[in-house]
Image: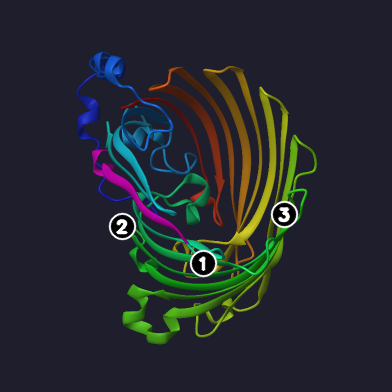
Amino acid sequence: MQLPVIQTEKCFDMPLVVRKVGIAKRCLSVLLLAAPCLVQAAYDPSDRFYLYAEGGYLFDSNILRLNTSLRPAQDYGYAGYSDTVRTTTVGGHYETTWSRQQFTLNGKFSDSHYQRFSGLDYHSWNAQAAWNWAFGTRWNGSITYGDSKDQSSIENAGSGIRDVLRDRNLDGRAIFSLTSRIGLELSAGRKTERRELQFTNDYNQYTYGVGLTTATEKGSVFGIRAQRSRITYVWLKQFIGSRATYDQNQLLLSARWPVTRKTTFTATGGWVKNEGNGLPSSSGGRNRIGSFEWNWDVDPKNNFNLSYGRQSDNPGNNTTPSVLANYAASWTYRPTVKTQISTRASESRRDYSNQTNRERTDLYNLTLSWKPMTQLEFSTFGQRVRFHGTTQSNDYKLNQYGVNARVFY
């Protein structure tokens, strides 16, 4: 499926080099304008209240996620499938404590503009309010509400389709200390997801859970959790009624083990089952889920991480329940206290219950970060992506390069 409302007319009225120079000048102007503010920006990471402004520039070699072997690049002008995206962001954080109650607010708003395919311009945001509460000597927990709108990530886009999603989440959690080392956890939540392109996949989800956790003197943590969710596709419900709803049950065991002072191992294992009048009728059956993560702090400058995860996919990616598996390896190197180099390679696989084929996404990323002062951050990255769909027409590959600057106040 291709993205709608594609406009390419304005890409022919000036040479590519002139456009690149113009954008570079605008980015430099923003930084120069922000420079006088840095003198007065007495930001500290421990501040209860702070604001930030951010500017980013991204080049994408295949902005439409097309199979380049099936559609000639010349069909889209001299620059082919590529485009550049400029994003500006403002955000902030606030927290306060009253007695043993802690309240936090986080939010940001972004505006993204495409140089050639202006029909893809969009706004995004992420806002969250949280209350971390405690009553008496045995009860504690949290209540959070979040509202976000953004594009689906490359690794989590079902069928390789890039969409703009709006998620609203309300979650509550309560922990009762049975003993000094054993806790009983109760949770409940509601999530709604709305999509601009795949609106037929819009859904509501209600979730309830109960679990037990225990900790040892050496820092190991073990747990067991049962969870039940009811998922309803709101658009489809208008036409097929109760068949647009199904239940999802999960049982999960978890363990966290600090092997040494520098090495930590985390693992989970269990199953998930979809049942009821869901979509499709073959959506039932039990699937294994689980994960492991190995984290190694080699020394103060180097960190290695290996991880694997297999979990239920976001219901909004497809009305056919699916399982998403992810393999990842990363390395982080900090040559100085102000600079950081990180690399990451990952492979994501999506299995559908009614299809024999798989979707696979391979991603390779290199990111460089520099923090010359507490209130100023710079980063640049490059990454290579390959997507293999259930049919050849959905396959694509792309390269992305970006720079980003953030100022805290």
> Is residue 396 found left or right of 20 in the rendered image?
right
- Name the amino acid, label 1: Ala
- Name the amino acid, label 3: Ala
> Is residue 356 found left or right of 318 in the rendered image?
right
> Is residue 321 found left or right of 253 in the rendered image?
left
Return the disc, 3 or 2, that comes first in the chain's sequence.
Answer: 2
Q: Nearer the viewer, residue 218 or 254?
A: 218
Residue receiving disc 2: 196
The disc placed on residue 174 is: 1
Residue receiving disc 3: 267
Marks 1 and 3 sit apart, C-alpha to C-alpha, by 23 Å
Q: Residue at x 25, y 13 (%)?
A: 36
Residue 55: percent from left, percent from top: 32, 28
Whether the magenta-drawn stretch holds residue 125 is answered as yes
Marks 2 and 1 sit apart, C-alpha to C-alpha, by 35 Å
Placement of 189 over or under 327, stated as above or below:
below
Residue 122: percent from left, percent from top: 27, 44
Which residue of the protein is positioned furthest toward the right in this rendering?
259
**Magenta stretch, residue numbers:** 117-134
- Residue 288 in view, yes or no: no
Q: Residue at x 72, y 62 (%)?
A: 269
Rendered-image quadrant of the N terminus = bottom left
Mark 2 neighbour density, 10 Å: few (under 14) some (14–19) many (20 or more): few
